[in-house]
Image: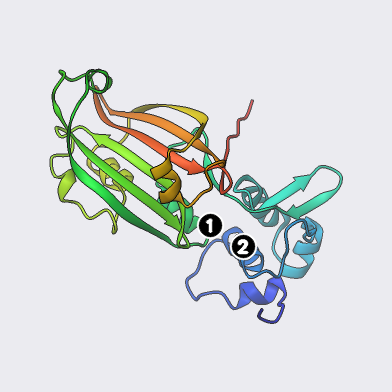
Amino acid sequence: MSTNRTLSEVIADAGDEPSPLYKQVKQGIINQILHGHWQPRQRVPSESELVAELGFSRMTINRALRELTTEGYLLRLQGVGTFVNEMKAFTPMLEVNNISDEIKNRGHFHTSRVLQLDEQIASHNMAMKFMLPPGVALFHSLIVHYENDIPVQLEDRLVNPDIAPLYLQQDFTKTTPFAYLTQLAPLTAGEHTIEAVMAGNDEQRLLNIHQTEPCLQTLRRTWHHEKVVTCARLLYPGGRYKMFGSFKK
């Protein structure tokens, strides 16, 4: 392990590209965690201590700590302090995001493996979901997404060819279906269902999980105005993922 360094040294040695101060603080703390200098369950310096060490405003420090808590890196206990959280990858429960962006925002690297990219005839139930006649052709993709070479999502997706006629010609190792489709037909509405499920044998193999490990499954359908763009089944290993949501009154 490399020599332990202070947070101020990590921030000072960061890249030359300018970024908002709160983002510098966030990335510095993330680096301390990822390099093992700040361990899970370790208490991190208080807002006052960070203000004194870094010379940034309390508002800057507060925003950095608040966002890191929302993103799952830190755990803040009222009246006790702030601690390094036991890390799991996470996805926002009530948002629709690009998994590649989620992974990169955690300071990790995303790769994907395309297992299928083909055309399928819609069943009666699936045609109804797309509000199309039975027997219509739909585009299909099956992709495993990796975070630092560890599989974290199996994406099984059907796409409306009227919306994305060139879908089967895309290289989804260089972009994601989400990024391609949202650029082509920006999301205007969506619905999803989240539940705990057990993966099938092939899914267990693709996600490299034990047969007794439960998964989080998201069934998602999205629209561009009056047309259904895509229906997707997203499967996450329960031991590697958690979902979060927040609200304000």
Q: Which of the two labelled residues, at mark 1 and mark 2, occupies the earlier sequence position?
A: 2
Quarter of the rendering containing residue 60: bottom right
Point 67% across, 77% down: residue: 9
Say above or below: 86 vs 16: above
* Front residue (pair 228, 88): 88
Q: Which mark is residue 64?
A: none
* Front residue (pair 42, 139): 139
x then y, percent, for residue 128: 25, 17
> Could you give the CA–CA distance between mark 1 and mark 2, rounded to whole angstroms?
8 Å
Is residue 15 in view from this perspective?
yes
* Front residue (pair 126, 192): 126
Is residue 97 in view from this perspective?
no
x then y, percent, for residue 131: 22, 19
The N terminus sits in image quarter: bottom right
* Label 1 secondary element: loop
x then y, percent, for residue 241: 55, 45
Point 72% across, 78% down: residue: 4
Residue type at the position of mark 2: Ile
Count of picture labels:
2
Say above or below: 21 vs 135: below
Residue at the bottom extreme of this rendering: 3
x then y, percent, for residue 137: 14, 30
Quarter of the rendering containing residue 49: bottom right
For label 1, the residue is 106
Residue type at the position of mark 1: Arg
For label 2, the residue is 30
Say above or below: 197 vs 5: above
* Label 2 secondary element: helix
